[in-house]
Image (cartoon, grey):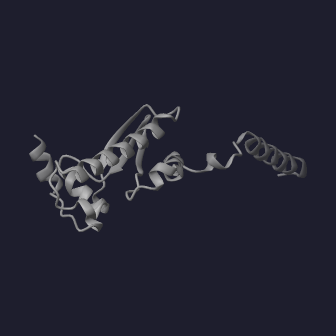
Amino acid sequence: MDRFTRNAVIGTALLTGLLILSVLPWDDRSWSPRIWQLNDLLKQDEMLAAYPYEFRALLFLNGIVTLKRPHDAAIPVAVALGALEPAVAGKSPDDPAMVAARDRLQRHEMRAIELMLEQPDVHSVIWSLDRAWLNGKGISLPSPDAAASAAQ
């Protein structure tokens, strides 16, 4: 390769690199995956930050966010509330303290949904059971196969 060709290749590579750098978005949020950005929104909300359960986005795909929560059909809300708020553990579902705790949980779930749906690229929110949190609290879980057959 002669000197002119070598210099032309180097110059073209430098110009191409500068062109690529000039079109990249330079705000900090563009460098992190969208799921991290959604989780940051949940963490920064004052209402959610004050609640004993940390709502987190698990997956973001095609405009659908999957959020984790401490209950579903396999784990009754009363069991999750007993772990969240020990003062209501073992109380009947009709007890005023249990009803108030359930209402607080529902308000926080709705706030998490609201935060997600405020995002222009989020079209829907679905829930997923936070099995790791429940295991950490010592709550035994049915196997996924047993839960699937019970739901049918």
Horizontal relation, residue 87 to residue 42: left or right: left
* Rendered residue at 37%/43% (across/down): 107
- Farthest residue, direction right: 4
Residue 11: x percent and y percent?
85, 47
* Rendered residue at 81%/44% (across/down): 15
Camera-side residue: 18 or 106? 106
Horizontal relation, residue 26 to residue 101: left or right: right
* Rendered residue at 51%/49% (across/down): 45
Above/below status of 116 relative to 147:
above
Horizontal relation, residue 47 to residue 75: left or right: right
Above/below status of 132 relative to 58:
below
Give the tally of numbered discs.
0
Residue 55: x percent and y percent?
40, 52
Residue 102: x percent and y percent?
27, 48
Above/below status of 87 relative to 147:
below
- Farthest residue, direction front: 96
The picture quadrant where one finds residue 130 is: bottom left
Above/below status of 68 relative to 86:
above
Camera-side residue: 60 or 7? 60
* Rendered residue at 41%/39% (across/down): 113
